[in-house]
């Protein structure tokens, strides 16, 4: 569990892990030099339960570094990242572990997700139809991971640790959670447990809700705070790189490159790449574009109102 300033939600997150029906695990908490009451809460649980291992960084090393550090500190055969603001149903670990132990071809198991609000009350079910993640074909799995719009909640599933460690882990740029999942799709199958056992908290302080993808560069890597970054271009570069180093047969590799080309030429991604360049010239471009989008949406709404 990597965390920074998580006192608002970390207690229910910890309790939901400690209350699992499967009990043979360690909970490694990596505190990224929190400034609030996170340290006290975590130390109290570590004193009460020997399964809880608490580590505090001397300084904030960025979210990517902190996530990766939890992997290095963990000792189990299987590994799961846990967000400090999410909670798990009691059967989460047991059900995911059953899948991994029954099928050696599966490298990641994760359950269906329910979105909850600030108070932990259910808001909606998160449904994304990635129907090919169990395919024998690496390029078919890869296509689903990069071409279907999804939030990436799969990254909080249960991994085979050895496979996870064979990747480059999380890179220090916004969106690197997507590239690591794409790389893992080239290595093996994913399995979605058909039960809603994961509760993802969607709230105003969530990292994806604060600032823009460009201003969040400092969240991923504190050394990049305030710097001009090109996240969409970096994402494209990383997708090409992971295909190149995949070691797949020529035909599968060609199919993966075709998927990357389709990703590149989609209107959504191409627009974001142009926005990267615009922001490098004028940092306010993102806010200006959002303001224009709101204005156009407002005009469409007014027009509909007049026709009623």
Image: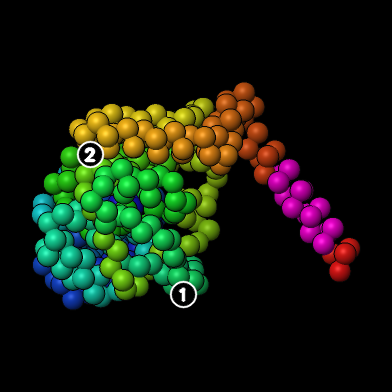
In which quadrant of the rendered view does residue 15 lie?
A: bottom left
Q: Disc 1 vs disc 2: which is toward the camera?
A: 2
Q: Which of 89/31 is in front?
A: 89
User: Nearest the camera: 78 or 237?
Assistant: 237
Can the viewer see residue 32 in this picture? no
Q: Which residue is mark 2?
A: 167
Quarter of the figure that contains the N terminus? bottom left
Residue lying at 46% horizontally and 37% vertically, measured from the top left: 262
Magenta-drawn segment: 291-304
Q: Main secondary structure of the magenta part?
A: helix
- Considering depth in this image, is 138 or 96 the residue closer to the camera? 138
Instruction: Estimate how packed mark 2 is, as few (under 14), some (14 to 19) or many (20 or more) residues with alpha carbons within 10 Å.
Output: some
**x then y, percent, for residue 129:** 41, 61
Residue 72 rendering spot, x and y as whole percentages: 17, 44
Left/right of residue 238 with respect to residue 169 in the rendered view: right
**Residue labelled with disc 1:** 122
Q: Position of residue 283 (x, y in %)?
A: 62, 30
Please say which color scheme the image uses.
rainbow
């Amino acid at each position: 569990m990597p965390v920074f300033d998580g006192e608002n939600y970390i207690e229910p997150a910890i309790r939901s892990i400690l209350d699992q029906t499967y009990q043979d695990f360690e909970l490694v908490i990596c505190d990224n030099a929190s400034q609030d009451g996170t340290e006290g809460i975590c130390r109290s649980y570590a004193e009460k339960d020997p399964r809880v291992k608490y580590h505090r960084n001397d300084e904030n090393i960025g979210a990517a570094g902190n996530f990766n550090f939890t992997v290095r500190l963990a000792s189990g055969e299987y590994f799961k990242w846990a967000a400090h603001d999410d909670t798990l149903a009691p059967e989460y670990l047991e059900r995911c572990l059953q899948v991994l132990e029954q099928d050696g071809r599966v490298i990641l198991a994760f359950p269906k997700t329910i979105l909850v609000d600030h108070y932990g009350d259910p808001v909606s079910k998160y449904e994304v139809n990635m129907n090919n993640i169990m395919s024998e074909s690496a390029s078919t799995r890869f296509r689903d991971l990069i071409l279907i719009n999804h939030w990436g909640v799969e990254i909080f599933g249960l991994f085979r640790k050895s496979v996870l460690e064979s990747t480059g882990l999380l890179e220090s740029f916004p969106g690197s959670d997507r590239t690591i999942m794409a790389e893992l799709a080239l290595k093996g199958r994913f399995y979605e447990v058909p039960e809603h056992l994961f509760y993802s908290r969607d709230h105003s302080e969530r990292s994806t809700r604060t600032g823009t993808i460009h201003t969040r560069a400092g969240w991923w890597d504190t050394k990049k705070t305030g710097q001009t970054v090109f996240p969409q271009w970096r994402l494209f570069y990383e997708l090409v790189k992971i295909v190149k180093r995949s070691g797949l047969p020529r035909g599968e590799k060609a199919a993966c490159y075709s998927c990357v080309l389709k990703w590149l030429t989609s209107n959504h991604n191409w627009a974001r790449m142009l926005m990267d360049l615009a922001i490098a010239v004028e940092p306010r471009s993102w806010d200006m574009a959002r303001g224009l989008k709101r204005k156009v949406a407002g005009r469409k709404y007014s027009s509909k109102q007049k026709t009623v």
